[in-house]
Amino acid sequence: MLFGLYHGLLALEPGNTHTNMQDMSLPLNAREEHDEETQDQETIQVCVFELSGRLFGLSIFDVQEILEKSPITPVPTTPGFLKGVINLRGNIVPVADIREILELPVKHRSRDSRIMILNFKNAQIGILVDAVTEVRRLEKRLLVTESIQTGISDGKFIANIIQYNEGFLVLLNLQHLYTAIQL
């Protein structure tokens, strides 16, 4: 138990250039402070990230790892949202900026920018994000999407919208995103 906690804290250190998402998740039985009421509610572990000033999330089971500084090699004659490829331990992984797909304003890479490596049907894809804010267990509650301004023009990319802090967290539908990228 202590090793897992230590390993998770080690992954959060600022100097660490990549983080394995499965190392950051604690098993349910490690959370002794949960009362019976919380255990009855359905929860999901989410990697929360920022894109163009909005908060988004993906299940930690879809996120393989997060890279801090990785050079992207441009590939000619590819769509504008496909920024290039990276070499990830011998595997060539395409990197996409999904802002164009989601019709969000473009933002240049900053010190907090990261590349999230996602797994979908045994394929890897990297997406550029402005920042990764946290990995967290959240209650899974569906909200009415018509009443919430998400800033995303096509609702098919939204899997769920969850109340988060004082705002909303948009959980992305990885299947529709992958289809839009058409790799």
Image: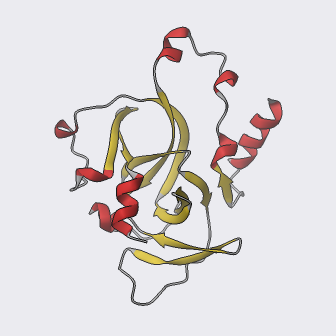
Camera sees residue 117: yes
Which residue occupies 67% across, 33% down? 26
Which residue is situated farthest in the left direction here?
Answer: 146
**Viewport quadrant of the C terminus:** bottom left
* Front residue of this view, candidates 180 and 18: 180
Which residue occupies 79% across, 29% down? 1
x, y percentage for residue 180?
A: 33, 65
x, y percentage for residue 15?
A: 72, 58
x, y percentage for residue 122?
A: 56, 60
Please tell me in which quadrant of the rendered image residue 18 appears.
Answer: bottom right
* Front residue of this view, candidates 108 and 92: 92
Which residue is situated farthest in the front direction here?
Answer: 121
* Front residue of this view, candidates 4 and 149: 4
Left or right: where 75 falls relative to 18: left
Q: Is residue 81 above or below residue 152?
A: below
x, y percentage for residue 72?
A: 55, 78
